[in-house]
Image (cartoon, grey):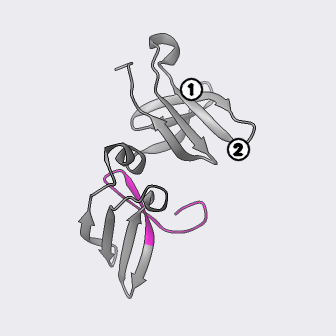
Amino acid sequence: MSRNGKPLLFVDGCKYRVNSKSGRKVRWRCASHERYGCKALVHTFDKTVIYYLNEHYNESQSAMCCYYAEFITSSRGGRQLRFNDYRFRFDKMSDRNNKIRWRCLSHSSKGCKAYVYTVDDEVVSVNDEHVCE
């Protein structure tokens, strides 16, 4: 469920929102459809996937469509973001729009340039080019 109480579907790391319903059939669109025009979609019948079009807008947009992100607590009690199997720490917050920049945990020790921006706990922008691997 989304924060608004609407159903979400996750397939292969991609988040989908309900696009339309007809009886027991539901058509799902990639959550990035409105923002990026992503073409990926899923059809379900009684909660079983019956059609899957894994055709995202383009390679750079696919990174924004398909990801795994969750907020976790560090061993010292701080809030961290786990994004695609990497951990990020809070870096700074914009005063204007509550946009938060999260830096890869390897930024200080290895100079990793990867970062994630969130607004209201939703990922809005990513530089997923890690040099810490």
Q: Position of residue 32 (x, y in %)?
A: 44, 57
**Is 11 placed left or right of 103 in the picture?**
left
The residues bearing labels 1 and 2 have C-alpha atoms spaced at a distance of 29 Å
Please check the rendered image and state whether residue 9 is part of the magenta-colored stretch, yes or no.
yes
Q: Position of residue 90 (x, y in %)?
A: 61, 29
**Residue projecting furthest to the right:** 95
Name which quarter of the figure residue 20 lies in.
bottom left
Vertical comparison of 50 with 129: above or below? below
Residue found 66% across the figure and 29% down from its top:
92
Vertical comparison of 131 with 100: above or below? above
**Residue projecting furthest to the bottom:** 23
Name which quarter of the figure residue 118 lies in.
top right
Residue found 37% across the figure and 74% down from its top:
27
Of mark 1 and mark 2, the one earlier in the sequence is 1
Q: In this orientation, which residue lies closer to the viewer: 18 or 60? A: 60
Q: Position of residue 132 (x, y in %)?
A: 39, 18
Q: Which residue is denoted by mark 2 in the rendering?
A: 97
Q: Amino acid at mark 1?
A: Ser
Vertical comparison of 4 with 98: above or below? below
Residue found 65% across the figure and 40% down from its top:
99
Q: Which residue is denoted by mark 1 in the rendering?
A: 75
- Is label 2 in a helix, a strand or a loop? loop
- Range of residues picked out in magenta: 1-18
